[in-house]
Amino acid sequence: MFAGCFLVLGSGAAALWWGQERIIGLFVQQANQYLRTPVRVGKIELSLFDQFPRVAITMHRVVVTGSLPHDTTALARARRLYFAFDAWDLLARRYRVRAVTLTDGQVAVRLDAQGRPNYDVLQMDTAASATDEPFAFDLEGIQLGRIGVTYVDASRQQQFAGHTRQMRATLSVKGEEVTVRAEGETHVQALRVVDDAYFQEKDLMLTTHLRINRQTQQIAVLPSEIRIGPATYGVAGTIGYYPATKLGLRLEGRQTDVQSLLALLPPRLNHRLAGYRSRGEVYFRGTVRGEFSTKVNPRLDFQFGCRDAAFYHPQYQQEAEHVFLTGTFTNGAAHSVRTAVLDLRNVRGQLGGRPFSGSLRYTDFQEPSVQLQLLADLDMARATRFFPVAAVRGATGTAQLSLQVAGPVAQLRAGRATNARGELTLHDVAVQLRAYSQPLRRLNGRLELRGNNVTMQSLTGYLGRSDFRVNGTLKNTVSWLLTPRQTLLIQAQVNSGLWDFDELLRLPTAVSTSKRGGRAGGEYALELPATLALDVQTNVRHLRFRRLRGRELHGTVRLRNQIVSSPALSVRAAGGRASIRGTVDVRRPNLVKVSTTATCTQVPLDSLFYVFEDFGQHFITARHLRGQLTAQIDSDVYLDGALYPLTDRLEAEVKATVRNGELNNFAPLQKLSMVANREQLRHLRFAELKNSLYVQSRTVYIPEMDIRSNVRTASLIQVTGTHTFDQQMDYHLSIPLLPGLLRRPDAAGGTPTGPRLLLAVRGNEQDFTVRYDRARAQLVTGARPEAASPAAAPRPTTTRPGILGRILQPTTRPNTGEADTRPATVPRKSTPKPVAQPQPGEYFEF
């Protein structure tokens, strides 16, 4: 028996070997009758085993040229192409191709800008029937394996890329009618329309049944299915393909859910919703009818919705339950975005057991108009977990929202939203923002939307330890939310029990100090958005900053273009009252400019030095001073990103009056025992002291002033000098030797004259000397000055921290890239000046 089989196979193989040239020749002759374009084949052979039990003509390295003129891109390439026919046909010398197998290939279908295809490579010859030819195609099966497919339509800006893993098809021809059945697995990389990509990286199971009528040039799509995961999409209808594409299709989704629908959309439309899942009935169906060409779109009509469905996100562990929705979409009578309408009706459901409802109508996708109604009772914790907001880390509390918006979106963005109404009522809401460590908590009150503005009614809450109660208006709110670079103006009355600037000025936890150019540890920062404007009346009972404890802060604060200004702010602090007017310019984050005019009245000196931590020095401290200070301070202060002063840019003028002053236990005075006893010098008192101080180039200049004290032998002391920010002192004192014999001042108010003791105090706060001021004495008497003693030269010293005392510390100015426009520093001359009052150009002219 086996011998007979081998004999038959051997006979067949011999017959094929002797007749293969004739069979291949007939195949090539017959194939050329159906081809309009050249086909290049590396090798053709006849095989008994490639498609056993059928005999196969195997073509290797096949290249099919496209039909577009001057097109160098091949229509198809294949590593192997098999044409199989039955052995019985071989014995009867009637060669009928029964099956075609294509493996390891690439098909590139293209349409040029005029809509001409590159696949018009076949020509049909209907003059003769298949029975009249010795070689003919009578396909019973087509099999594709590992075939890449690309489709590019330049006229419609459409692209398709996919990969057929395994596809089986049958083809039958009866006269002018061709019937195709196909089933298989395909991976779609993307279907791109203009800039949007659909069906990205999706595995499809395709089952299709097509009937092609070559005479009417129409394709009848019999009920076919596309399965994507558990969802099934049914397609049926007709497609006319000449002279223009005309569609009449019906589509329906079965066993669909929200993720299967969102997965079909491009990332631009579904990126925020792609992670959500659904349970329950979600459906859609629709029709596509009309011509589809470069100038005309078909009519689209779709219905979709859900019934008692639940939507949730696996990561957030929250879900909206019992959701009902009815929706429609159409591109309208003109089949375009101008007449497109999206309509959502009868929307209702529950989130965390709290109800919500609403509707939405969106028309004209080119110049859209919107009609929105929304009612919601919100649990803020569940709402923010179900649909997270990037700027919010978490929230608690409850809120009721009512919103109605109608009109063109362009008018909403332009601030002409006349038909916008809404209310948001907050009940003990807390919000933790991602960018700040201080939470907003215990928010209560009502916000009302009227047109483009939002009114705040008794909005109360806490920011960290600071509290507020706000009544006012947020102007241009809708435009600010919908349009980039729009300005939000806040006009409000703010009342507060406490402002804690230790918290309010701390760096946000999410921002590194290196980004601001600041220093590590316990830094402050001041950030103001360019799109925020303020016009606020403040009334604060208490404020706190380091040692400062202020009360009764009143005044107006304005913000425009990242510049804070105030015409008048008043506050009680350090036992007195101060008023401030000026500006804070934060347009350059690493170079903040503060220009102010401040006045204080009857401020105790010891309290002032305590509050400002002795201004960063230990030479004259709060324990040394008593008295009441009245002063006016004009200053320009520059700060870096961490609000450290750039002391080399600081310029100021201080006009001060001290009444009932005392200088107690001051070490330099103890060295004047030659003019008074130590007990009197330990408690030096003076009735009134007036002078103007100047700050420039990191130096405090003290013009000559008279100190009338309680010490009889030194009842009039004249002082002048300088004090640098590096704590280098150069003071000059003039003390009368015979105060009882001094001539009275003249009528013009001059200073009494007589013999005086001239002293110089030089050094730093830890190491200083009190010496006879020989250089000044020679200058007064007209003698030639001698060289300064080496012992009187300033010595370097270390600096100490403080609040405003940072002004008295050496600080290296960061490289901001800005031109230095400060006045030039005049170098110190070798000859001492008679007084230390700054020369022209050495201090800022106010």
Image (cartoon, rainbow, N blue to C red):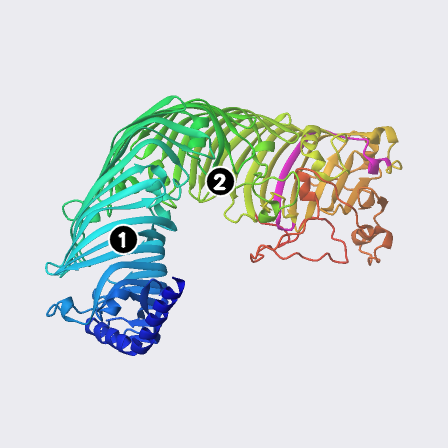
In this rendering, is residue 677 above or below 369? above
Give the percent coordinates (x, y) of residue 374: 30, 28
Q: Which stretch did the figure color magenta?
A: 648-670
Q: What residue sits 48% from the left and 36% below the top?
A: 566
Mark 2 = which residue?
564
Whether residue 301 appears in this view of the structure is no
Question: Is residue 128 shown in magenta?
Answer: no
Task: Give the crowd class for mark 1: few <14, some 14-19, many >=20 residues within 10 Å.
Answer: some
Give the percent coordinates (x, y) of residue 549: 62, 27
Amino acid carrying mark 2 in the image: Val
Mark 1 = which residue?
182
Left or right: residue 390 compared with residue 839: left
In this rendering, is residue 75 above or below 684? below
Give the percent coordinates (x, y) of residue 508: 56, 38
Whether residue 818 appears in this view of the structure is yes
The image quadrant that residue 455 belongs to is: top left
In front of the other: label 2 or label 1?
1
Amino acid carrying mark 1 in the image: Ala
- Distance of mark 2 from mark 1, alpha carbons? 72 Å
145 or 530: nearer the viewer: 145
The image quadrant that residue 683 belongs to is: top right
The image quadrant that residue 15 belongs to is: bottom left
Give the percent coordinates (x, y) of residue 179: 19, 55
Where disc 1 sits, the SS reads strand
Where disc 2 sits, the SS reads strand
